Amino acid sequence: MLSRAASSPNKRNARARLLDAATKLIREKGFTATSVDELCAAAGVTKGAFFHHFASKEALGVAAANNWAETTSALFAGAPYHLPADPLDRVFAYLDFRRDLVSDEIAAFTCLVGTMVQEVHGTSPAIRQACEASIFGHAQSLVPDITAALAAHNVHGVQPIDLALHFQAVLQGGFILSKASGDPAHAKASVAHLKAYVAILCEVPLPR
């Protein structure tokens, strides 16, 4: 029998594999259509291992949303859009970064928490709240740059958090259009129109 110290890394690996499988399968199929059996098969773990780490599929959904928030927060924290000295340039660079994340594989660039919350917002308060924390938390991370950009260009009557949330609404809407059409170009076009809106709002030429 393995000691607790020796077995704990395997337990952590099993949990991580299940979360990775959840991220992939839910983005491809949706939360409801993804079964526990499929998650276990994709992660290479037993159903017993699943229920060792998660009391239910709903608990897995909450953990997947939290894991998504942590993973994407690290991605955005290290992204190059923070480098420009001018705050408006940073805002435009953020939108360019979001555009560049769009790939030919729709499931690979769409949002896990956006996908889940559309399905279960009325049936799973726990998952809804975890998705809310992820989406609104990311929006909040944009507020300092948006605040500085609006101030630098004398834009009044716009609340930075409202604009940050509008960014998320447009991005999530672009994902939906791409899913509906099967065409990633709609997600990129949504970002392009968002950049144009910001340029108009700040009364500057639209950057390339």
Image (cartoon, helix red, strand yellow):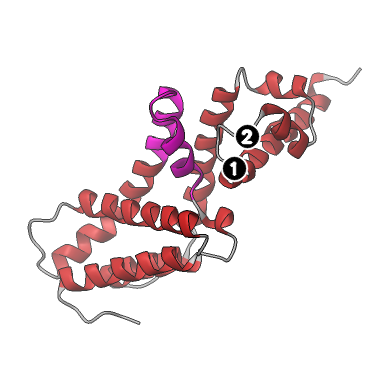
Task: Quadrant for the C terminus, please.
Answer: bottom left
Q: Residue at x 21, y 62 (%)?
A: 148
Tell me if residue 105 comes above or below residue 140 in the rendering.
Answer: below
Alpha carbon separation for disc pair 2 and 1: 6 Å
Callout 1: few (<14), some (14-19), or many (20+) C-alpha neighbours within 10 Å?
Answer: few
Kindly identify which numbered label has been placed on residue 52: none
Q: In this rendered view, identify the residue nearer to me: 72 or 166.
A: 166
Circle 1 residue: 29
| Residue 121 forms part of the magenta stretch | yes
Q: Residue at x 13, y 56 (%)?
A: 158
> Which circle's residue, 2 or 1, is located before the other in the chain?
1
Q: Are marks 2 and 1 in contact (CB under 8 Å)?
A: yes
Kindly identify which numbered label has been placed on residue 34: 2
Q: Which residues are magenta?
A: 111-134
Helix, strand or loop at label 2? It is loop
Q: In this rendered view, identify the residue nearer to me: 51 or 83.
A: 51
Image check: 130 left or right of 40?
Answer: left
Image check: 47 left or right of 147?
Answer: right
Type of amino acid under label 2: Thr
Point out residue 191 in the picture as x, y percentages from the top left corner.
Answer: 36, 66
Tell me if residue 102 comes above or below residue 55 in the rendering.
Answer: below
Point out residue 108 in the picture as x, y percentages from the top left corner.
Answer: 58, 55
Tell me if residue 83 comes above or below residue 54 in the rendering.
Answer: below
Q: Residue farthest to the front? A: 181
| Residue 203 forms part of the magenta stretch | no
Helix, strand or loop at label 1? It is helix
Image check: 77 left or right of 12?
Answer: left
Type of amino acid under label 1: Lys
Tell me if residue 117 comes above or below residue 195 in the rendering.
Answer: above
Per the picture, the main secondary structure of the magenta-coloured stretch is helix
Query: In the rendered image, which quarter is residue 7 located in?
Result: top right
Q: Residue at x 48, y 49 (%)?
A: 111
